[in-house]
């Protein structure tokens, strides 16, 4: 299978919305449904292309014969684009599907993907939530993810609890403060504090302070099947 075919198979795999209600019972039902970093990167590209061409969501959705809600979710990385939808969007934006998929991939890196140099890391821009993430994970690593989250004052994952599959997550606050809800508990973490939780635990977090918060997250990935390399979100 070619690199582009491999990327297409991941992009085409349906990924349900990961946000759950504050009810722990309902939130628990979303366990095992990780958010894909590929979807987030692809959505960023599509949104940037649309804005560069001065077009609205409604205009592009109508031209591609798809719902406004679906296009919005794809741009935000909450839904995966099927191969058919990718072709429709690529044709509408006058770019190739291969370029979209290639840009949604990690760079190959050095030493068989075991080294990722400074300046080659992928960024996930969630500016509407006041969050940006730099993914430090080398391309060859499939069982762990490492990222730095920068959270603007008031930035948050939202008011609802969410889960992202199996595995464990550990973090340390490098700068500022982090208000972390895990299950039915809330913790205020400050510079130098570290924490951990299971990825299947309902949670949410925000920056309650007046300065930017920076957090390093390490995430272990337990995939559902061989070859599944979706990446989780903190």
Image: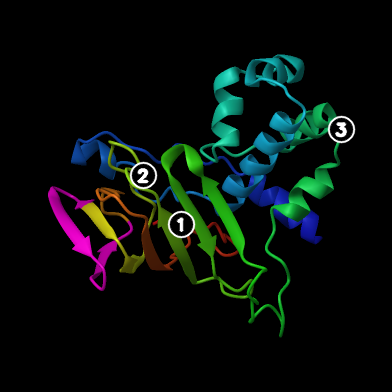
Residue under the image location 54 percent in, 70 percent down: 136
State which tag comes first along the sequence, 3 or 2: 3
Farthest residue in the front direction? Answer: 210
Residue with the mark numbered 2: 155
Whether 195 is among the magenta residues is: yes
The residue sitting at 39% across, 49% down in the picture is 152
Percent of width and height locating residue 180: 23, 53
The CA span between labels 1 and 3 is 31 Å
Q: Quadrant of residue 175?
A: bottom left
Near mark 3 (Cα within 10 A), the count class, few <14, some 14-19 or many ≥20, is few
x%, y% of residue 111? Answer: 71, 85
x and y percent of residue 114 in the render? 63, 81
Residue 202, compared with residue 54, is above or below; it is: below
| Quarter of the picture holding the N terminus | bottom right
Q: Secondary structure at mark 2?
A: loop
Q: Is residue 106 magenta?
A: no
Q: How many angstroms separate mark 2 from mark 1 (CA)?
A: 19 Å
Residue sitting at the far bottom: 111
First to last magenta residue range: 181-199
Q: Which residue is mark 1?
A: 232
Which one is earlier in the sequence, the residue at label 1 or at label 3? 3
Q: Residues within 10 Å of mark 1 (few under 14, many from 20)?
A: many
154 horizontally vs 53: left or right: left
Sequence-wise, the earlier of marks 2 and 1 is: 2
What count of labels does the image hold? 3
Between circles 3 and 2, the one closer to the viewer is 2
- Looking at the image, is 73 positioned above or below residue 113? above
* Left or right position of 199 against 58: left
Q: Which residue does the numbered mark 3 point to in the structure image?
A: 94
SS of the residue under disc 1:
loop
Does the rendering let one see residue 169? yes
Please state if 208 lies on the left or on the right of 103 as rendered.
Answer: left
């Amino acid at each position: 299978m070619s690199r582009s075919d491999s990327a297409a198979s991941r992009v085409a795999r349906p990924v349900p919305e990961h946000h759950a209600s504050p009810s722990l019972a309902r939130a628990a039902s979303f366990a095992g449904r990780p958010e894909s970093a590929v979807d987030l990167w692809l959505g960023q590209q599509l949104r940037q292309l649309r804005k560069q061409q001065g077009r609205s969501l409604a205009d592009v959705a109508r031209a591609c014969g798809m719902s406004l809600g679906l296009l919005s979710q794809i741009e935000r990385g909450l839904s995966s684009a099927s191969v058919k939808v990718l072709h429709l969007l690529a044709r509408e934006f006058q770019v190739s599907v291969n370029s979209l998929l290639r840009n949604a991939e990690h760079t190959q890196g050095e030493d068989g993907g075991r080294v990722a140099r400074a300046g080659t890391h992928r960024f996930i821009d969630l500016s509407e939530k006041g969050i940006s993430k730099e993914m430090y994970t080398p391309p060859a690593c499939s069982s762990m993810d490492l990222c730095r989250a920068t959270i603007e004052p008031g930035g948050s994952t939202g008011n609802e609890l969410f889960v992202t599959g199996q595995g464990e997550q550990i973090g340390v606050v490098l700068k500022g403060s982090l208000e972390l809800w895990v299950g039915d508990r809330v913790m205020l973490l400050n510079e130098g504090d570290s924490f951990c939780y299971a990825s299947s635990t309902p949670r949410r977090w925000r920056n309650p302070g007046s300065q930017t918060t920076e957090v390093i997250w390490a995430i272990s990935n337990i995939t559902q099947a061989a070859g599944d390399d979706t990446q989780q979100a903190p």
